[in-house]
Image (cartoon, rainbow, N blue to C red):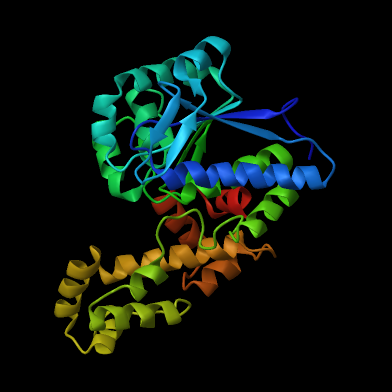
Amino acid sequence: MEHRHPGVHRVDLVVYPGFKALEAIGPMSVFDYANVHLRQQGRSDGYEVRVVAERAGAVRSDTRMELQATHTLAQMEIGGAGCTVLLVGSRDIGQVLQASPALVQWVGRVAPRVPRMIALCSGSFFLAEAGLLDGRRAATHWSVAQQLQSRHPRVMVDADAIYVRDGHYWTSAGVTAGMDLALAVVEEDFGHALALDVARDLVMYLKRPGGQSQFSVHLASQSMRHDGVRAVQQWILARLDQPMDLAEMAAQAAMSERHLRRIFQQETGRSPSAFVEAARLEAAKQLLEAPGQLPLKTVAARVGLGSEQALRHLFQRYLGITPVAYRERFGS
C-alpha cells in the first residue's frame, strides 16, 4: 500500500500541564518505529511528530517527565495543523477542562479542518466539550465513560471499545490503548506489513485478541476474590459450547441458586446468566476475528448458541452490528 499523503505525514501532539505521559510517549514511539522501518526499506520518514502546547517550552506531565513544546496552538491555527492532531488525556479531566477553556475552543476551531483528529483516553472530553462528538460513537477510559455520557448525552459512548473511528474523528480507551490506535493509523497510512513490523518491535498485538474490548471475562474471573464465584466463572468458561443452567452453577459453588444469584450480582455487578452471555459473546468475537472464516453456524455451536439467529441476536443486542459486519471490520 502506498503512502496516502504526499511527503512527510505531520502529527501534532497536543499537551498541557498534567497530561498523561505514557499516552504521549506510546504513540510517539509507534510513529518513530514506523520511520525506522521505512528507512530500512530505503524510503523517507513517513511521520514528523511535533509537540504543541498553549505556550512553547517545557510542559510537565502527570509524572516527573516533561515534553518540550516546539509549537504553540496559535501557530498551528494560523499556519495549519498537521495531517493528524493528537490530544492526550489527563488523570483529572474535569480540572483540566476548567483550567483550559482556550484549548477546548481551539479544538472546536481546528478539528473540523484536519484530515484526522485523534483524542486518547479522557482527551475525548475536549472533542465532546466542543460539540464535535454529538451523534457520533466515541471511546474513552472505562473509569470516565459514565461521566462522559452524563455530561454529553448526545455522544454515543462505547465504554467497551479499545478505539473507535467515526468519520475523521478517532477516540481511544486509556493509556496503552493509544498505541493500539497509533498502530491502526500506521496500518491505514502504510499498510498491514509495516504496522505488523512495528507491533513486533514493540512486542504488541497488531489487533488485541478478544476483540476491540477494554474488558475480558477471562481476566475478570482470574481477579475475582470470592472463591465460589471464581469457581463458577471458571467452570462456565471451560464449557461455553455446552448448555448450562443456574442449578448446575450453584452446585459448582456449593450454594443455593438464590444465594449464588445474590453473591454473583454483588461481586460482579451482573447475574450469572449475563456473565454467560458476555463470555459467549467474547468467544464468538475471537472466532470471527481469527483466520479461516468459520461458518456462522459453526461459530454459534462452538460458543453454546443454538443457531445463527441466536448469534445474530446476541451481537445486535450488545454491539449493535451483525456477526458478518463484525468479521468484516475486525477479522483477519
Q: Position of residue 18 (x, y in %)?
A: 33, 37
51 with respect to 245 (left or right): right
Vertical relation: 189 (above or below) 264:
above
Residue 127 location, quadrant: top left
Q: Residue at x 62, y 42 (%)?
A: 31
248 w.r.t. 24: above or below: below
Comparing 315 with 96, the one in front is: 96
Q: Where 295 falls versus 3 (above or below)?
A: below
Q: Position of residue 42 (x, y in %)?
A: 85, 42
Quarter of the image that includes the N terminus: top right
The residue sitting at 55% across, 51% down in the picture is: 326
- Residue at coordinates 60% horizontally, 46% vertically from top-left? 30
- Residue at position x 59%, y 52% in the image: 330
Q: Position of residue 9 (x, y in %)?
A: 67, 29
- Please identify the quadrant where the C terminus is shown: bottom right
State left or right for residue 114 relative to residue 318: right
